[in-house]
Amino acid sequence: MEVKILHLIDGAKQARGLTVIIDVFRAFSVACYAFGNGARKIISVGDIDLAYKLKKENPGYLLIGERGGKKPKGFDYGNSPTQIENVDFTDKTIIQTTSAGTQGIANATNADEIITGGFVNAEAIINYIKKQNPEEVSLVAMGDVSIADEDALCAEYIKNAIENKANDFSEIVNHLRGYRSAHKFFDPAIDWAPERDFDLCLSLDRFNFVLKVVPYNKDHVFLRKI
């Protein structure tokens, strides 16, 4: 098994084999919390206009996501696990669009299979990869406009575990607490990134499932809990 770590949208475009799109802060952590609270399906779209269109056609669907970190106008929830931590999503269909994570899915067109995740379901991802035992694994650390340590470190964590190498998660958390992409969580002036998001996104192995990308049509896909 060959395991590669790739970065950003260009990395998603290069991904081959079993591909893991990683977005720790916060898209695919949010997706896990939504499924953990009973969501039936998450439709993942890259284009926000398509998200609005789907909502108009399906008023019962919920809009979750962000642009520039903030909840877009008309969305039910932002890209924050704190906002949805105690929300009952039983049998709900969610439309999710974000600046990084969902863009990775949209651009990983050469992958044989796509799953998503972060630290919150890292062990489930590791076990799934080992069970599938593909020839090639692409771990895509999405970042945003530049490489983000939380996604790169998550990719390294998964790769190390697959290769039976040691990980020190407490060291990762301590590093990320002072890292630039986490600053927003500790700035009281930024109301769209509560401090609790940091802890929820780094709640290691909180969920024991993998989210698999399933094609729906040419415009979007949905995430299925497996």
Image (cartoon, rainbow, N blue to C red):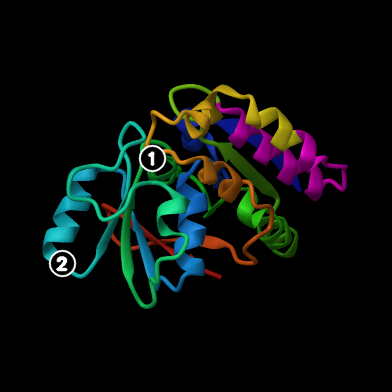
In this rendering, is residue 78 above or below 226?
above
In the image, 105: left or right of 164? left
Give the residue type at disc 1.
Gln
In the image, 122: left or right of 214? right
Q: Tell me which segment is drawn in magenta.
A: 148-171
In this rendering, is residue 135 above or below 66?
below
Single out the mark in the foreground, 2 or 1: 2
Q: Main secondary structure of the magenta part?
A: helix
Q: Earlier in the sequence, mark 2 or mark 1?
A: 2
- Category of crowding for the residue at label 1, using alpha-carbon neighbours closer than 10 angstroms: few (below 14), some (14–19), many (at least 20): many
* Residue found 87% across the figure and 42% down from its top: 166
Mark pair 2, 1: CA separation? 24 Å
Secondary structure under tag 2 reads loop
Q: Which residue is mark 2?
A: 59
Identify which residue, 80 or 39, lies in the foreground: 80
* Residue found 64% across the figure and 31% down from its top: 177
- Category of crowding for the residue at label 2, using alpha-carbon neighbours closer than 10 angstroms: few (below 14), some (14–19), many (at least 20): few
In the image, 51: left or right of 123? left
Residue 164: image x %, image y %?
87, 48
Residue 176: image x %, image y %?
65, 31
